[in-house]
Image (spheres, grey):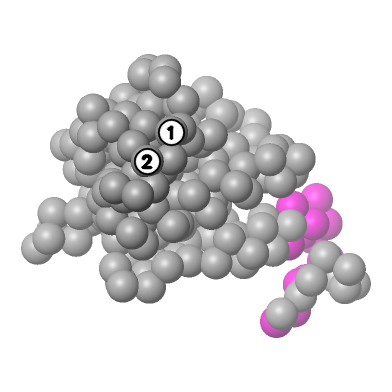
């Protein structure tokens, strides 16, 4: 069942940001847009490429008042090691500019409906939560196909535009320079 149009499930997970380990919550981001990026595993090439691409996008998202949280079923220890490891061994190259959250109980993945129960890992799923805590976008990919960060930004821009303007509509392939 889709979460679109419904309040986002709560998130309270231990995670890593740079070298800091702490608990991250969705509640602490109340009043901001939040992009949630679920991924299957640390130390895999495709997940590494996605997390690196979303991390590179973080400054652009911040300009749009949007926080970014990346979530997997890995432990905080695995995520910390992944962030610190060099790219030649499948790591993120010595750090990560976005929070990497550890859903080791798999409860958050289940709450969002993105846990592959057979494999025990998250799907490649993306959720956009508005400043009121409502899910306005949800998508999930099977594990072999990565996501587009360009599309994530376009969707954020479109939802920001329509949020304060009930008459606005963003047509197929809408771009920020287009009229709404």
Q: Position of residue 164 (x, y in %)?
A: 80, 50
**Along the viewing direction, whichever of 11 and 72 lies nearer the viewer:** 72
Looking at the image, residue 163 sits to the left or right of residue 69; the answer is: right
Write down the quadrant of residue 15 in the picture: top left
Q: Is there CB contact under 8 Å for labels 1 and 2?
A: yes
Q: Is residue 124 left or right of residue 66?
A: left
Question: What crowding class fits label 2: few (fewer than 14 Cα within 10 Å), some (14-19), or many (20 or more)?
Answer: some
Instruction: Kindly report the distance in space between the C-alpha atoms of the residues bearing marks 1 and 2.
Output: 6 Å
In the rendered image, the vertical position of residue 154 relative to residue 48, given as above or below:
below
Q: Which residue is mark 1?
A: 94
Image quadrant containing the N terminus:
bottom left
Residue 10 seen from this side: no
Could you say which quadrant of the image residue 61 lies in? Answer: top right
Residue depicted at 71% across the width and 46% down the height:
60
Q: Is residue 40 above or below residue 21?
A: below
Q: Which residues are magenta?
A: 158-172
Lower sequence index among marks 1 and 2: 2
């Amino acid at each position: 069942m889709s979460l679109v149009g419904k309040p986002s499930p709560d998130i309270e997970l231990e995670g890593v940001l740079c070298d800091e380990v702490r608990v991250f919550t969705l509640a602490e981001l109340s009043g901001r847009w939040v992009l949630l990026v679920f991924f299957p595993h640390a130390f895999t090439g495709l997940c590494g490429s996605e997390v690196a691409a979303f991390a590179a996008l973080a400054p652009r998202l911040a300009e749009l008042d949007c926080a970014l949280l990346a979530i997997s079923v890995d432990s905080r220890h695995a995520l910390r090691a992944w962030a610190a490891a060099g790219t030649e061994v499948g790591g993120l190259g010595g750090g990560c500019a976005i929070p990497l959250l550890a859903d080791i109980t798999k409860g958050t993945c289940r709450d969002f409906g993105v846990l592959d129960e057979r494999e025990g890992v998250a799907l490649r799923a993306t959720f956009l939560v508005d400043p009121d805590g409502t899910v306005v976008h949800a998508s999930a990919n099977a594990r072999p196909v990565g996501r587009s960060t360009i599309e994530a930004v376009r969707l954020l821009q479109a939802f920001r535009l329509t949020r304060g303007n009930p008459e606005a509509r963003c047509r197929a392939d809408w771009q920020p320079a287009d009229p709404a």
